[in-house]
Each structure stands twice: as structure tokens, then as C-alpha cells.
Image (tube, coloured by chain):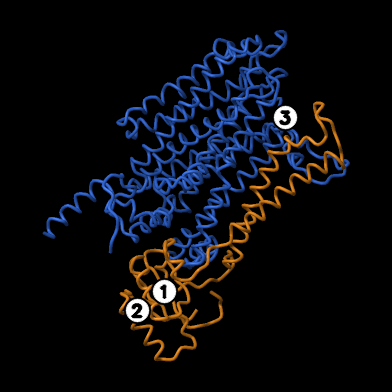
Chain colours: A blue, B orange
Amino acid sequence: MSVVVSHIREPLVNGGKTYHQITEDLCSPTEKTPSAAWVIAFLFAVTGLATYAFCVFWTVWKGIGSWNLNRTVGWGWDITNFVWWVGIGHAGTLISAVLLLFRQRWRTGVNRAAEAMTIFAVICAGQFPLIHMGRLWLGFFIFPYPNTRGPLWVNFNSPLLWDVFAISTYFTVSLLFWYTGLVPDFASVRDRAKGIRRKIYHALSFGWTGSAKHWQRWESLSLVLAGLATPLVLSVHTIVSFDFATSVIPGWHTTIFPPYFVAGAIFSGFAMVQTLLVMTRKVLKLEDYITIGHIESMNKVILLTGTIVGVAYLTELFIAWYSGYIYEQFAFANRVLGPYWWSYVGMMSCNVLSPQLFWSKKLRRNIFVTFFMSIFVNIGMWFERFVIIATTLARDYLPSSWSYYTPTWVEIGLFIGSLGLFFTLYLIFVRVAPVVAIAEIKSILKAAGDQYSGEQAKQSAATADQSHH
Amino acid sequence: MSTTHKEVLYGLYNDEVELLNAVKQANADHLDIMDVFSPFPVHGLDPLLGLEESRLHIAGFIYGAMGTLTAFLFMSWVFTRDWPIIFGGKPYWSVPAFVPITFELTVLFASIGMVVTFYTICGLSPTRANPTLDDRITDDKFCIAFDTNDSSEADKEKLRSFFSTSGAAEVNTKMV
């Protein structure tokens, strides 16, 4: 058996795994009774979910008046949360699609969990525009359906409607992509299971057999979906940024928004992936599959996108000054020095300054630093959206209508609660599906397993060579 | 595989390189392979089995084009024929504003269409009782299967000797 051994590339699968060992390691978390850590986390998450359900109920029952929005600040935590969640939902498809097209093998260790996270984040994101309409039960008005009012159609020229199409397309395509990847792995779980469990996984795996022709089509499908998802993922946050950029509000009406929002989305998405995977790999003992090398690669992306976002912040300030337009200049002076200065400081320190630590290889490869950094970035990106939305609105054209906005407990509860929704879904996912793509890990084993790649392979090759002579 | 009962003789290999060599040998011996099963896609197998390149991407293009046309023509019809409204003093037929939704529906149609086509032509669905030859095929075994329903004993013996010379770890018969 001849395999190419690379001594330069860091292995992506450690522990000298065999194919069977991979199946064993990756299927077994779905088969064991849950650990105490999982149960405690799940209880917290479900409590959050209950909080969320209660706050949604309260909002619908009492009306939007239960929030502190006013005539000047019409978008507050609701839209901040929406943009924050959508941004987080960008990493999964970026990892699975863009890195597939770039042939980055390290994506195989993290793509499954990242895609799942994407889907759950988009579910959370989609809630907020619906809730902030106030009359939740009329949410279907956003779709162009034949109606008895003319029919009166929706406004296809509005970026808010583009958003409806972008988010729903993104959710659907991500879900299809993710599930198609899961089908062969559900078959692996099925073939180890007995009784009712086997029946359930048979249905989930669509009766997958592993036939050569099916694999060929499966690969073709994955590649084309990746090709479609790549421009899609860039379009989604571009369109979210259009919600602001096509308006005539100083501070929003800027052409830099689309690329700046996309970079920010990738930045926050990777941070959330880090938060989840650092915990997941520990709890499910997946350190051999989600290695320090994977974490380092993602930290490099965080460093790059964080720096891009920083450049965008500075560019905004420069252009505001350079434009000579006093309303624009005021909007940005107000962002930095106005009543919400603290959120600007939070944004700058968490998003721009703190990721610069990752220039150090030692810190990039440190689990604790990575975990805390990922939390910082999540907080910083929330502040970014709050800065853009609330500070801009609070100081509009007419000083007589200037205002200040603080959330009520309902708005805070909705945000905390949406985290509960997100973690509930994620925790269920890690119990029912393999968190790492089994078939894909097997297909890269002979190129990236530590028997074939890296220092250890070099040493064992050397000893084999010596014994040969 | 259909659910009509037929006898299948199959061999299991431990490694994809052994599998590829065995398929080459089967081709040299002019054996008619029914199917090959593996836990992950084995590259280099398709030409040996004489599988043509998948045309799924062509279907994807057609679905995508349908999405483009649907979105663009529908919005054009609504804003020029059915209910023209002036938004911000722009022309009724404001093409640049149609670009985002046209793009999104192109991607949506192509993706849904391709995925549905994939499951349909592969015959995969949650309710389908696809019998599998061996539980270890989704784990660590690579399988070559022959349809031996109408084969003579001499033919089967020939297949068995092929399996033993090509290094199969196990050889079994199963009705599927």
C-alpha cells in the first residue's frame, strides 16, 4: 500500500486512527447516555428558551409598547439582535462552501458543527424581524401571495423585502447542504443501531447504501451547492447592510457597508464557532479531530477579518471628515463621543484591539485565550450593531426630537432567551447527529492523518527506514 | 437496489487501495460488477466502473435559469402591468432593484431542484426500505457486489476465486 507522506503539513487527525476507530469515536456520542455536563447545559438552555417564549408572549400580549422604542429610536435591541444572529450564521456556510472550493482540508473537522450552528443562528435571527412587527400573526404579509386586496403586492424595490428573500433562501440552502452531508453519516449511525433507533436512523439516512454512483452524484451535488452557497453567503449580509445603506440617514448611507458587514459577519461567525467547538471537543472528547491546528486556522481568519473590520471603522471616520458634509461628520463624532460612547469603546476594544493578540502563534494555539477571545468578539460584534443602529437614530436631524434609548426587561429577556433557543437546538444536535463529518474525515485520513503527515509520521518513517537497512 | 429478491455475491475489502486493485482485476477478467459500496467516496473508482460523469450540474443550471426567469418576469409583470407604483420617482421597470431577489431565487430554485433530483434519481427517501448488504459498509469495509441470481455454479466459483486472489477479507451471499 503506497501513500504519500507529508512531513511539512500539520496532521488534521491525531491518534493514528483507523476507519473503524473514526466511526466509533464520532458515532458514540449519539449512543451513550448524556453526560452530567450536557444535562446541566441543557437545563440552562431550556430555561433560556422558556424565558424567550415568555417574552415573546408578553410582547404579543401587551404590544410593542412593552419595549422602550420611541418615535426617534425605532430600531433597538430587536434589530441589533437580528443582525448579530445573521452575522453569526455566516461562518458555517463559509467554512463548508468557500473552504471546499479552496480545497482547504481542515474544513472537514469543523464543517458539520459550523453548519449546524449557522442554521440555528439563522433560526434565531429570523425571529426578530417577525416579533418587531408587533402583530406576529400577520407575518405572512411579507410574502408576495395572491390576495383579495387587488392583489396588492409587496414592494420588490425595498431592501427589507430583499432581506426576506435573502434570509429565507440562505436558511433553505444551508439546511439542504447540511442535511445532504449528514445522510451518509446517519447511515453509519443506523448500521450500528438496533430496534426502533435503527428505524429512525434509517428514515433519517433516506436508505443510504454507499453505492459508487450515489457517491459520485453526492460529490457533484456538494460541489455545485458549494458553488451556489459561496455567492449566496456574500449576498446575504450585503443585503442586510442594504437595509441601512440604501436609507438617507447619515452614518448609514455609506457604500462601504456591504464589504464591511460581510467581513464582520465572518468575524463574528468564526468567533461563535470557536466558542462552541472549544467546549464541544472537550465534552465529547473530539480533540483528535478538532485539533489545535483547526483552532489556529480559525483564529487566523478571526485576526484577518477583525483587522478588515478595524480598517472599515477607521475608513468610515476618515471619509466622514473628508466628505466635508457636516451631518455625516456629526453622526460619526456622535458615535465616538456622544451619549453612547461606551458602546463605541466596547466595539473598538473587543473587535479591533483584542484580536491583534493573535499575531502571536503561542496565543493563537492557546485554548483559554481562544475561548475568551471568542466571547470578546461576540460581545464586540453585538456592540457594533448597537452602535450603528441606536446611536445613529438617537441623534437625528432635529435636535428637538433627540432621544436616548435603554431596553426594558422584555427586550433583554428576548436577547438572553434567543441564546437559550440557540443552545437548546445545538445541544439537541450534538446528541442526535455526528458532530464531525464521518465520511469526510475518512476520505482525508490518508492525506492528513498523523500516520501520514507531520512530525510523528516523519519519525515513524525514519524508524521504518532504519529497520529496513 | 430494488426490493425484488435476487441473490448477490459480495466481497469485503479492508482498504480502498485493495478495492481499486480488485476492480481493475475484475475488469481484466471481464467480470460484470453489479455495484461497489464504500464508506466514503473513493476517487479513481468511477472510470474503472465505467460510470459517466454526473449530469446533475446541468439540471442545476436549468433549475437556476428557471428561478432567474420566474423572479425577473414576475417582478416586471407586477410593476409594469399588474399594479404599477412609483417608488421614489424611479421608473416602473426599475431593473437594478430587481437584482437581489432575482439572484436569491436563482440560487433557491437551483438548490432545491438539484437536491430533489438527487434523491429522486438515487431512489433515496425516508420511507424506502433499501436493504444493505453489510452493516460494516458504512464503517470500514469496501464492497464489490455481483448479481448471481441467474449464475451457474461454475460462474459463482469463478467469482469466489476472483475474491480470494484479489485479497477480499470476507465473501458472502445475500438475498436482497
Q: Residue at x 13, y 60 (%)?
A: A468
User: Which chain is home to disc 2?
Assistant: B
Q: Amino acid at mark 3?
A: Gly
User: Which chain is home to disc 1?
Assistant: B
x then y, percent, for residue A105: 40, 48
| Pick the front one: B130 or A306 | A306
Q: Residue at x 39, y 24 (%)?
A: A356
The disc at residue B144 is 1
Q: Which residue is mark 2?
A: B163
The disc at residue A267 is none
- Mark whose residue sits in front, 2 or 3: 2
Q: Secondary structure at mark 1?
A: strand
The answer to whether one can see residue A15 in this image is: no
Categorize mark 3 by other alpha carbons within 10 Å: few (<14), some (14-19), many (20+): some
x then y, percent, for residue A338: 58, 10
| Pick the front one: A412 or A175 | A175
Q: Amino acid at mark 1?
A: Ile
Above-or-below relation of A330 to B163: above
Categorize mark 1 by other alpha carbons within 10 Å: few (<14), some (14-19), many (20+): many
Mark 2 and mark 1 residues within 8 Å of each other at the beta carbon: yes
x then y, percent, for residue A359: 35, 27
Mark 1 and mark 3 residues within 8 Å of each other at the beta carbon: no
Q: CA distance from mark 1 to mark 3?
A: 65 Å
Of marks 2 and 1, which one's residue comes earlier in the chain?
A: 1
Above-or-below relation of A251 to A243: above
Q: Which residue is mark 3?
A: A63
Q: Secondary structure at mark 3?
A: loop
Q: Amino acid at mark 2?
A: Phe
Q: CA distance from mark 2 to mark 3?
A: 73 Å
**Are discs 1 and 3 both within one chain?**
no
| Pick the front one: B2 or A23 | B2
